[in-house]
């Protein structure tokens, strides 16, 4: 006869085994996604509207193809065919019209398993999820790339009568502008945005009074791009330096797994 204690023990052991198996299954799913043999150096690129953008997709060195002619590359955007490369040549029948004449691979690179796609003169309609898939005797797999587009340009700085002005010609979506002094205090500035005929914003931001030998930083930021600028004043001259960083939001699959894990832990806890 099983005692109450034994029944509780057995059911706990059973539960632990079931949850252990589930967790292993989830980890295996998560892991199988990560170990796809195709990689991208940037799976969430931000393109500058009107400029060209390289969408990175390649096989790692260990799985480079033996014979270049046998590499099959397909680039798609949801149901649309973006580009196809087969038997050492482009195979573009069925290519979606909006990509015609605007995309290319690098044949020399393809021979080494690098299927990166150059998209010319990016427009906002190009935003979205692309899938690159590579197949060769040495390896195969696919990678998703989330392309986002914004307009951004580095500001230029001018100094006149103790007023420091930053001008940036094209930004989209509309950004915010923040000025700080060297100690990191936010300063009051006057910023105006003008919508250009291209639909982007031009920015003029003025800061006063400024010191005749001071350093100021100016941050122009929207949801996709941040431009950090340093403006150094020496006498009547000002010099500026800018670098850009791009927003990399956490990818949905990772948070999905996390949610599943958390739900499982909650169920476990409740039972
Ligand atoms: C793939 O080819 C492109 C175009 O030539 C190049 O810019 C990129 O660095 C290459 N990527 C790798 C991982 O070799």
Image (cartoon, rainbow, N blue to C red):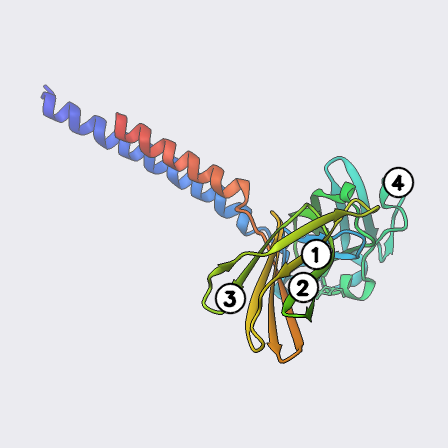
Element class at badge 1? strand
Q: Which residue is mark 1?
A: 204
Give the residue pinned by disc 3. Answer: 181
Query: Is the residue 2 above or below the residue 110 in the image?
Result: above
- Between the C-alphas of marks 4 and 3, the distance is 50 Å
Mark closest to the chain's N terminus, 3 or 2: 2
Q: Quadrant of the C terminus?
A: top left
Labels 4 and 2 touching (C-beta < 8 A): no
**Residue sitting at x 55%, y 46%:** 33
* Whether the residue under disc 3 has CB within 8 Å of ligand 1: no
- SS at mark 2 in the image: strand
Task: Give the spatial CA distance, label 1 vs label 3.
Answer: 18 Å
Instruction: Place residue 42 in its image quadrant.
Output: bottom right
Q: Is residue 205 visible?
A: yes
- Is residue 95 visible in the rendered image? The answer is no
Asked whether the residues under the numbered discs 2 and 1 touch, taking CB atoms below 8 Å apart as contact, a structural biologist would say yes
- How many residues crowd around disc 1 within 10 Å: few (fewer than 14), some, or many (20 or more)? some
Q: Are marks 3 and 2 in contact (CB under 8 Å)?
A: no
Q: Relative to 15, does residue 87 appear above or below in the rendering?
A: below
Characterize the local packing of mark 3: few (<14), some (14-19) or many (20 or more) Cα atoms within 10 angstroms.
some
Q: Quadrant of residue 126?
A: top right
The spot of residue 200 in percent (x, y) is 76, 47
Q: CA distance from mark 2 to mark 1?
A: 7 Å
Residue at 27% in and 26% down: 270
For the residue carrying disc 4, how many other residues have a C-alpha within 10 Å: few (<14), some (14-19), or many (20+)? few
Q: Which residue is mark 2?
A: 165
């Amino acid at each position: 006869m099983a005692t109450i204690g034994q029944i509780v023990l057995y059911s706990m052991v059973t539960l632990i085994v079931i949850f252990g198996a589930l967790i292993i299954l989830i980890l295996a799913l998560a892991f199988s996604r990560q170990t796809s043999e195709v990689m991208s150096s940037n799976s969430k690129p931000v393109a500058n509207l009107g400029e060209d953008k390289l969408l990175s997709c390649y096989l790692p060195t260990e799985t480079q193809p033996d014979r270049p002619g046998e590499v099959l590359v397909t680039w798609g955007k949801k149901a649309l065919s973006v580009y196809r490369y087969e038997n050492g040549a482009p195979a573009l029948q069925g290519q979606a019209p909006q990509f015609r004449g605007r995309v290319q691979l690098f044949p020399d690179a393809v021979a080494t398993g690098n299927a990166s796609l150059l998209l010319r003169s990016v427009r906002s309609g190009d935003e979205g999820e692309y899938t690159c898939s590579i197949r060769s005797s040495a390896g195969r797999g696919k990678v998703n790339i989330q392309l986002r587009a914004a307009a951004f340009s580095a500001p230029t700085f001018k100094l006149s009568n103790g007023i420091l002005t930053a001008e940036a010609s094209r930004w989209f979506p509309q950004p915010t502008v923040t000025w700080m002094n060297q100690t990191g205090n936010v300063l009051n500035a006057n910023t105006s945005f003008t919508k250009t005929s291209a639909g982007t914003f031009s920015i003029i931001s003025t800061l006063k009074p400024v010191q005749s030998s001071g350093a100021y930083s100016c941050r122009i930021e929207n949801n996709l791009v941040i431009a950090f600028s340093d403006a150094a004043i020496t006498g009547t001259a000002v010099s500026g330096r800018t670098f850009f960083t791009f927003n990399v939001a956490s990818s949905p699959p990772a948070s999905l797994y996390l949610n599943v894990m958390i739900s499982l832990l909650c169920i476990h806890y409740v039972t």
